[in-house]
Image (cartoon, helix red, strand yellow):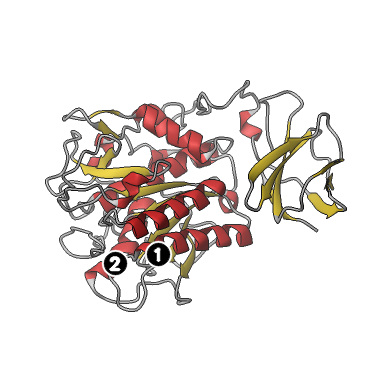
Amino acid sequence: MAAVVALTAGGALPAAAGAEEQPAILKAYGLDWIERVRDDAWPQPKAQRPVICLLDTGVNVTPDTPADDPDGPIVARLALDGGTGVAQGTEWQHEHGTQMASIIAAPRNGYGTVGVFPQARIVSIRVTEGTETFIRPEAVYLGVRACVQFAHAADVRTAVVAIPESSYDQRAIDLEQWQSAEALASREGASIVAAAGNEPSAEPVAPFAVPGALVISAGSETGFACSFVAGVDQATALRGPGCFPSRSWPAGSSAATVATAALLAAVITRTPQLTSAEALSVLRASAVPGADGLPRLDGVAIGRGFPVAGSSEAGPTLVSTAVQGPQSDSSRQLLWRPRVRVSWSRGHLRVRRLDRHRRGRIVVEISIRGGGRRTREARHAASSFRFRVSKPGFVRVWIVSPDPGRWRSLTVRSAVR
């Protein structure tokens, strides 16, 4: 267990008055367009957009990371120890979470820097306790669980779990925590983006053993590995912006990780019918070979079709090959939340719609304890249907168009009565 590594010239991003430009390294990785996306291009109101869960050392209140607001950039500050969620100390390591949140979502306000995705919504979870300056392995799973619990309570979608800690050994106990965390995040429809490491090592760090996690290594503008990255085969990782610290950008795999998490969240926010796994596939497919031949993040292709400031064309909605059917009526995708009631009696589950916003087929995803998930779908547009099943703890319900691929409602999570 090593300390959280920031590798900066000294703590949080500086409060340089009038600093309105994004760091140049973001353009090298094709990330500078996100900040310029027109506000009317995001299909959901701010308070309904998915969130990024940031597992770190807490986030202080600054002009770039203001007090909690459902619209963001900081939706909530949570802490595993029940504290306020701000940094629990004044060492520079304790400022790490504040710095990472600024990289993700700092607005254009004349203070500090401009984040990769200023429209982002962050749920900060302080996973360090006492005077700790590192993240314990068991806190990885506990942090993801806290993220999931908040999402259920606030009825929001978790798109990404960003873990910018970077120095876990591949001990068996660490791997169990990571694998449990990734499994939980995956069940909730979220993707984990984790740092590859900042210290030379003969063995990969724990995230490499988690197939569902996207592991990010720090790279230069041309994609070469930074001199301090872990010296292991990182062919399965993506290089992100992480070299050459400056007044507006820290060096390290932490910065590269949260920049990538911001891009992934932007993709899902722009096209919410994509699952996190599909959006992750978009990122992987868009990667290009770096100067040393290993894959590096490239957001240029992903940005095509996103209407940015000064553009009058809306452009096509981004979809992946995993989304089947025509994507017509995209401007109205997922803009309504169905009202449903779910009950169970005598071995039968009944799902009943309480609205008729759109005629469509009811789809139910059932979580069976110890038995994974099962999906049932009504054959025709109906107000209710029932089927035999063991009583589940909860279900997810959504409505799909009779014309496959045209639209799908938001997914609602319902406890079983």
Question: In the rendered image, is residue 236 in sight?
Answer: yes
Q: Does residue 198 sit above or below 131 in this rendering?
A: above
User: Along the line of sight, which residue is nearer the eye, 275 or 145?
Assistant: 145
Mark count: 2
Q: Which residue is mark 2?
A: 134
User: Along the line of sight, which residue is nearer the eye, 4 or 330?
Assistant: 4
Q: Position of residue 71 (x, y in %)?
A: 53, 56
Is there a contact, CB below 8 Å, between mark 1 and mark 2?
no
Q: Position of residue 169 (x, y in %)?
A: 26, 56
In-image side of 228 versus 392 (left or right): left
Quadrant of the drawing holding the N terminus: bottom left
In-image side of 415 versus 325 (left or right): right
Q: CA distance from mark 1 to mark 2?
A: 12 Å
Callout 1: few (<14), some (14-19), or many (20+) C-alpha neighbours within 10 Å?
A: some
Q: Residue at x 39, y 72 (%)?
A: 86
| Amino acid type, mark 2 | Phe
Q: Which mark is residue 138?
A: 1
Q: Does residue 335 sit above or below 134 in this rendering?
A: above
Say which quarter of the image contains residue 215: top left
Q: Which mark is residue 409?
A: none
Kind of element beneath mark 1: helix
Q: Position of residue 298 (x, y in %)?
A: 31, 32
| Amino acid type, mark 1 | Glu
Quadrant of the drawing holding the C terminus: bottom right
Q: Residue at x 22, y 54 (%)?
A: 250
